[in-house]
Image (spheres, grey):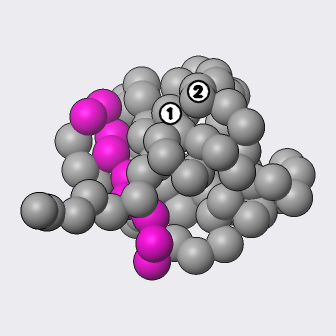
Amino acid sequence: MIEILYFAWVRERIGLPREKVETSAATVADLVAELRAREERYDLAFADLASLRVALDQELSSFDAPLAGVREVAFFPPMTGG
C-alpha cells in the first residue's frame, strides 16, 4: 500500500489531496500509467509529465525511480524561485 499525495493543480484536477493505493508498479512511471488508466481525471492530471515533479518519501526523485520500499509518493508542479 502506497500513499499518494497531490498538490496544487494536480490535486485540483484529480479532486483529492491524497489517497492510498494498492499497486504492482515497479517504478513511478508504472504507477502513473496505472493511475492514468483509472479515469479521465487522472489521465488529464498526468498528461504532461514534463510539467510535474515527484518525491518519494519526501525526497525529490525521478519518474524512472523504483517504488520498492516506498511508502509515500507526492506529485506537484515545479517550484519557482522568487
- Amino acid type indicated by mark 2: Arg
The answer to whether 16 is drawn above or below residue 32 in the figure is above
Q: CA distance from mark 1 to mark 2?
A: 4 Å
Q: Quadrant of residue 47?
A: bottom right
Verify whether residue 53 appears in magenta. yes
Q: Earlier in the sequence, mark 1 or mark 2?
A: 1
Q: Describe residue 11's horizontal placement relative to residue 79 as left or right.
A: right
Residues at circles 1 and 2 in contact by the CB criterion of under 8 Å: yes
Q: Nearer the viewer, residue 68 or 10?
A: 10
Can residue 44 be seen in this snapshot? yes
* Residue on which disc 1 sits: 5
Say which element carries label 2.
strand
Position of the N terminus, as image quadrant, is top right
Which residue appears at 26% of the width and 34% of the height? Answer: 58
Q: Circle 1: is it few (<14), some (14-19), or many (20+) Cα within 10 Å?
A: some
Amino acid found under the numbered disc labelled 1: Leu
Q: Which stretch did the figure color magenta?
A: 50-58
Is residue 14 placed above or below 42 in the rendered structure? above
The residue under label 2 is: 18
Name the residue located 87 percent from the left edge and 58 percent from the top edge.
40
Q: Position of residue 45 (x, y in %)?
A: 67, 59
Front-most of 49 and 80? 80
Q: Residue furthest right?
A: 39
Judged left or right of residue 8, residue 19 is right
Residue 31 location, x and y as percent?
Answer: 60, 51
- Image quadrant of residue 56? top left
Does the magenta-highlighted stretch encompass residue 4? Answer: no
| Residue under the image location 49 percent in, 54 percent down | 28
